[in-house]
Amino acid sequence: MSLNGGITIGYNKSDGLHNEMTDLDNINSLIDVFLEERGLNYIAIKEFSLFLKEKGVSYSTDGPALRRLLRKGKIPNAEQPGGKGTRWYIRHSKYNELPKPKVNNVIGLAPVVNDDSEILILGTLPGPDSLRKGEYYSNPGNQLWKILAYIFNRPTPLSYHDKTNFLRNNKIALWDVLKSADREGSLDKKIKNPVPNDVLGFLNEHTSIRTIVLNGSKATEMFRKFIDLHRLNPDIQVFHLPNTSSSNRSTLNEKKKEWSAILR
């Protein structure tokens, strides 16, 4: 198949690529035309992918060929300015670099706690969904609520009102190790300039808490960095458990097993 008289689409069985674009000079020109028509210096790969679909570039059941070619470095001027695992962009050929990724100063949420809370679950810092809604663990991909429902043999709470009632009924408090940080996107590994919450002061105010659960390796890292364990009440037990986020590739059943071993 030929696109705009120059971009050839074919199938290469040797490396498993579908719809391989073999004329890179022409696709480079098409990218530049696309950007110039819209008055842009660069474009996110998803938007350019939609443009290609409009032009008749087909996709296989294995996923878009464009993304596969990106990973092989075959698309000119394509970069991941935020590093590996971040979003792809394609810049105009006359520009030598992409703009730096946007970094936001993130300020966390107030703790959810009751006078009789016995378990404190500490995350690292809320993600964009939670910050926008003002609700802990609101991202549908995060499995905390499913895990807790399994442990306490209750239906998974859906509304935030039901979730906070669930926490109160099971004497669980939620907070984060960090008060604020600079972060690009939502991944913990992108956190810079972290500022801790006063966790020890919080525990002194809520003396019924006897168990701290650190949700994920980054929360554990930040806890060890900022919290003086010598000042922690020796009656309080601290556990590191797998991150309930979808960024943790463990299965839901694996997470349930490890979390229930501590909280059940």
Image (cartoon, helix red, strand yellow):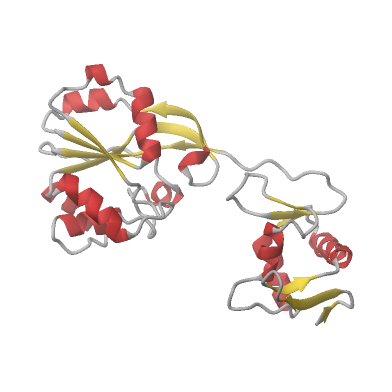
How far from the left and from the top, in percent, is residue 62?
59, 74
On the rendered structure, is 189 left or right of 163?
right
Residue closest to the eye, 204 or 77: 77
- Point 32% across, 48% down: residue: 136
Q: Quadrant of residue 171?
A: top left
| Residue 200 position in % (x across, y down) | 25, 23
Residue placed most toward the observer, 38 or 97: 97
**Is 55 located above or below residue 49 in the figure?**
below
Furthest residue toward front: 14
Left or right, 207 with reference to 44: left
Q: Name the residue at 70% across, 76% down.
A: 13
- Position of the N terminus, as image quadrant, is bottom right
Nearer to me, 161 or 249: 249
| Left or right, 98 with reference to 263 | right
Residue at image point 40% right, 37% down: 218
**Residue 179, quarter of picture:** top left
Image quarter of residue 116: top left
| Percent position of residue 19, x then y | 72, 75
Number of residue marks: 0
Specify whether residue 236 is in view. Answer: yes
Is residue 161 shown to the viewer in this render? no
Q: Position of residue 264 (x, y in %)?
A: 13, 49
Residue closest to the far bottom: 1
Question: Which sits in the foreground, 243 or 162?
Answer: 243
Left or right for 221, reference 35: left
Q: Is 52 above or below relative to 220?
A: below
* Position above or below: 257 against 173: below
Residue at x 39% of width, y 44% of height: 126
Tell which residue pokes out farthest to the top in this image.
230
